Image (cartoon, rainbow, N blue to C red):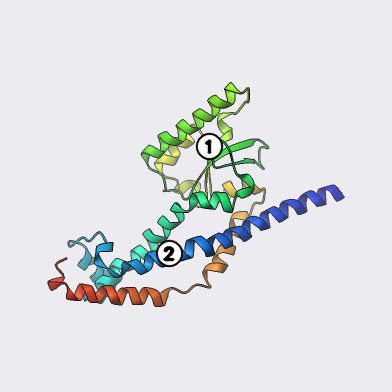
Amino acid sequence: MSEKLTNYQTNNDELNHIIEKGKDFFIKEIIPSHLANTKKLVKLKEFNLNPFLDKYKANFLTGNIEPLSIAKALVYPRVLGTSINTTFGNKLQRFCSEVLEGYASTTSGIDIEYIDKLDGHKKYCQIKAGPNTINKDDVTTIKNHFHGVRQLARTNGIRIGFDDLVVGVLYGTKEQLSGHYKAIDKEFPVHVGEEFWYRLTGEIDFYDRLTDAISEVAVEYDGSKIINEVIETLAQEIAETSGFEY
């Protein structure tokens, strides 16, 4: 009984460590990069402008095509969409090395290794951010990495099944997976969101615990003032651009 309690406590400590490291990662890596990328948006040159749509989007958003409205229509999608998603994707390897440091892999083409808490098998895993974050070329690259690992293992007399080479997607659901992920899933399992974290940790609600913990950190940061300052500065440049012909 005491041995089981010790094992559970050790595991719980490991899970708490992941959560704390996740919060720390968000504070040190994601927020500063997001803020820096937001502050860059004071110049029109930072945008891929579309004269056919920019005024339309401004009017759709605010009901007019004043410079301030155009600036809002340009800035909001970048700040709340492209910018933060790109930041998270670019920091993925650091996420693996810092937040998932206890599962680090030394195998080429593999991000982490872990014992699957559902089937008890050792998994060799490539980590991806979300359900739409790979392209067609990535499918071939991932499959080639996995085939290479199997070949090396066979050479060294180690058995690795196809089911033991997996892609772990940090967030999302199976239904949201793109066709590129589904192409991989036909040969190698793709575990996404709650299922991935469950298999990694053995705790069914760990995905919710982790995202909730990061959300607690996120609410401490209010970027509205910076966004408004960026929009006002950008609007001034738009107003100075003759006839908005940019």
Q: Position of residue 161 (x, y in %)?
A: 59, 28
- The foreground one among 181 and 79 is 79
Mark 2 lies on residue:
34
Q: Is residue 202 above or below residue 83?
A: above
Q: Earlier in the sequence, mark 2 or mark 1?
A: 2
Q: Indicate the quadrant containing the C terminus: top left, top right, bottom left or bottom right.
A: bottom left
Looking at the rendered structure, the secondary structure element under dot 2 is helix
Task: Identify residue type, mark 2.
Answer: His
Of the two numbered discs 2 and 1 in the rendering, the one whose residue sits closer to the viewer: 2
Task: Identify residue type, mark 1.
Answer: Pro
Give me the residue at 53% from left, 24% from top. Answer: 151
Q: Is residue 105 left or right of residue 246?
A: right
Q: Position of residue 26 (x, y in %)?
A: 53, 62
Q: Position of residue 20 (x, y in %)?
A: 63, 61
Give me the residue at 48% from left, 61% from top. Answer: 30
Quadrant in the rendering for residue 231: bottom left
Q: Is residue 108 above or below residue 43?
A: above
- Point out which mark residue 32 bears: none
Looking at the rendered structure, the secondary structure element under dot 1 is loop
Q: How many marks?
A: 2
Mark 1 lies on residue:
189
C-alpha distance separating marks 2 and 1: 32 Å
Quadrant in the rendering for residue 64: bottom left
Q: Is residue 153 visible to the viewer in this orientation of the structure?
A: yes
Q: Is residue 242 left or right of residue 152?
A: left
Q: Position of residue 19 (x, y in %)?
A: 62, 58
Task: Decide: few, some or many residues near mark 2? Use Cα within 10 Å; few <14, some 14-19, many ≥20.
Answer: some
Q: Is residue 133 above or below residue 219?
A: above
